[in-house]
């Protein structure tokens, strides 16, 4: 079976499953799953660029996602003027001290020949610089975090439309990837994976503890949205008229009652908002898919796959392996950073405590493996399957257990045990799906199409 037929069948099945959720549970739930599937598709495409194109085992997907989410806060949240007034000057002084320390260290390293004099000079500059940085930094952060800590306690952001943060999140994640690449890309693949995982945990630890930057575990809420608010829609005349037109009249031909109409407007407002998000997310997925496909089929993409398949031969042909790896690592991380900003936009809040490797690294890897590494459409369908199963496994298991009355009594120890473990069935199902795919289709549902030539 060709990849085109596989893709058509796979996406048709996923569409049918989402429709079934819409009819069986609610359209709000179905659209919520769809939106998270679309965001996960962007994440998996970013990881696919790193692993599927170049063979880079990035175990720090979580860091790129988190920096994208932080950027959404720094772009869209209004600046906290009082926090800036009490601590902004001290943080600026700390930044200036850092820059002067770096400049002085570089000058000493270049101007003074290697000797004990250079060693002592470097040590003195670093210790003096650290002292100034620590003094101004602590003075500023303590003052900032003391400003109404129940509501703010941080500097805030620029107060710009949050859609700008999607692109800015990609740029910020790319900058972090450049720094990580300078440090870790010279390492062997297994050491590179460990390094990226460690740096990712460091990044999350910073976000959890630096309250002046992101409120830490107190979370940032009330972020601006690029779509209407449900409450506003429920009070808008054109939307109310649209709902009346859609629902029509009662079975007997009379107008719907006020209570029924109120409930219909409330439910429709949630559906409308989620549809607006879906349109934005689909646009991002299609844009990234278009660029990713063009890049993969270009000479650059063929070169990256040649490096992935045989680094020694590519190096012998004059290719700079480390430089190319750094290039694709930055691009893939930028795409993941965009998805992180999208996720924070959808949630309307930034919660550093929610960034865990299981959700933002392991599951993204499962998406790429199930879909087919090296295939962009495969990454998307893998994201849809993985996230759908992850969300629906628990309600499906609970429904199945609740309908075992014909076999097991209500007081049966086995039924009680199954009810207890039903919420954890997502772990079992994800492992089972991964094993089945690796056993019967090791290259994924949509395998990578071999190029005619490199």
Image: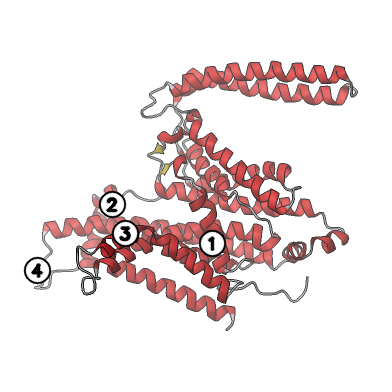
Q: Mark 4 points at which residue?
A: 254
Which sits earlier in the primary sequence, circle 3 or circle 4? 4
* 3 or 1: mark nearer the eye: 1
Image point 42% across, 59% down: which residue? 35
Q: In which quarter of the image is residue 302?
A: bottom right
Q: In which quarter of the image is residue 51?
A: bottom right
Spatial CA span between label 3 and label 4: 25 Å
The local secondary structure at tag 2 comes to helix
Q: Name the residue under label 1.
A: 366
Q: Mark 3 points at which residue?
A: 271
Q: Would you say 300 lies left or right of 87 here?
A: right
Q: Would you say 388 lies left or right of 265 here?
A: right
* 3 or 4: mark nearer the eye: 3
Residue 233 is tagged as 2
Q: In x, y percent, where is residue 69?
A: 50, 44
Which sits earlier in the primary sequence, circle 1 or circle 4? 4
Q: In x, y percent, where is residue 433?
A: 49, 69
The local secondary structure at tag 3 comes to helix
The local secondary structure at tag 1 comes to helix
Q: Residues within 10 Å of mark 1 (few under 14, many from 20)?
A: many
Res 288 seen here: yes
């Amino acid at each position: 079976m060709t990849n085109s037929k596989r893709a058509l069948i796979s996406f048709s099945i996923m569409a049918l499953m989402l429709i079934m959720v819409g009819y069986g549970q609610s359209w709000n739930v179905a659209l919520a799953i769809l939106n998270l599937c679309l965001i996960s598709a962007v994440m998996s495409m970013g990881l696919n660029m790193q692993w599927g194109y170049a063979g880079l085992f990035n175990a720090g997907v979580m860091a790129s996602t988190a920096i994208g989410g932080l950027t959404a806060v720094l772009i869209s949240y209004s600046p906290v003027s009082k926090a800036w007034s009490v601590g902004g000057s001290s943080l600026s002084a700390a930044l200036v001290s850092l820059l002067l320390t770096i400049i002085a260290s570089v000058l000493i390293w270049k101007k003074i020949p290697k000797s004990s004099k250079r060693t002592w000079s470097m040590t003195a500059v670093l210790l003096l610089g650290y002292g100034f940085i620590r003094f101004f930094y602590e003075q500023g952060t303590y003052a900032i975090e003391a400003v109404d800590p129940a509501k703010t306690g941080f500097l805030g952001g620029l107060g710009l439309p949050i859609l700008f943060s999607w692109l800015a999140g990609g740029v910020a994640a790319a900058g972090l990837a450049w720094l990580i690449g300078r440090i870790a890309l010279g390492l062997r693949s297994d050491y590179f994976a460990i390094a990226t995982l460690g740096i990712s945990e460091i990044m999350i630890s910073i976000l959890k503890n630096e309250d002046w930057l992101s409120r830490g575990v107190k979370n940032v809420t009330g972020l601006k949205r690029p779509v209407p608010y449900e409450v506003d829609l429920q009070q808008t005349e054109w939307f109310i008229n649209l709902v009346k037109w859609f629902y029509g009249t009662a079975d007997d031909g009379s107008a719907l009652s006020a209570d029924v109409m109120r409930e219909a407007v409330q439910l429709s407002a949630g559906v409308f908002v989620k549809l607006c998000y879906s349109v934005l997310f689909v646009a991002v997925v299609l844009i990234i898919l278009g660029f990713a496909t063009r890049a993969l089929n270009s000479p650059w993409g063929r070169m990256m796959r040649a490096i992935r398949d045989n680094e020694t031969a590519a190096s012998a042909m004059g290719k700079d392996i480390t430089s190319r790896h750094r290039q694709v690592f930055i691009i893939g991380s930028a795409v993941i950073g965009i998805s992180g900003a999208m996720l924070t936009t959808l949630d309307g809040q930034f919660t550093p405590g929610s960034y865990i490797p299981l959700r933002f690294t392991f599951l993204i890897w499962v998406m790429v493996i199930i879909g087919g590494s090296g295939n962009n459409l495969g990454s998307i369908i893998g994201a849809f399957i993985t996230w759908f199963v992850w969300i629906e496994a628990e309600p499906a298991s609970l429904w199945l257990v609740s309908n075992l009355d014909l076999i097991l009594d209500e007081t049966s120890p086995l039924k009680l045990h199954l009810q207890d473990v039903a919420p954890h069935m997502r772990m079992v199902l994800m492992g089972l799906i991964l094993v089945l795919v690796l056993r019967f289709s090791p290259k994924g549902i949509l395998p990578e199409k071999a190029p005619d030539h490199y």
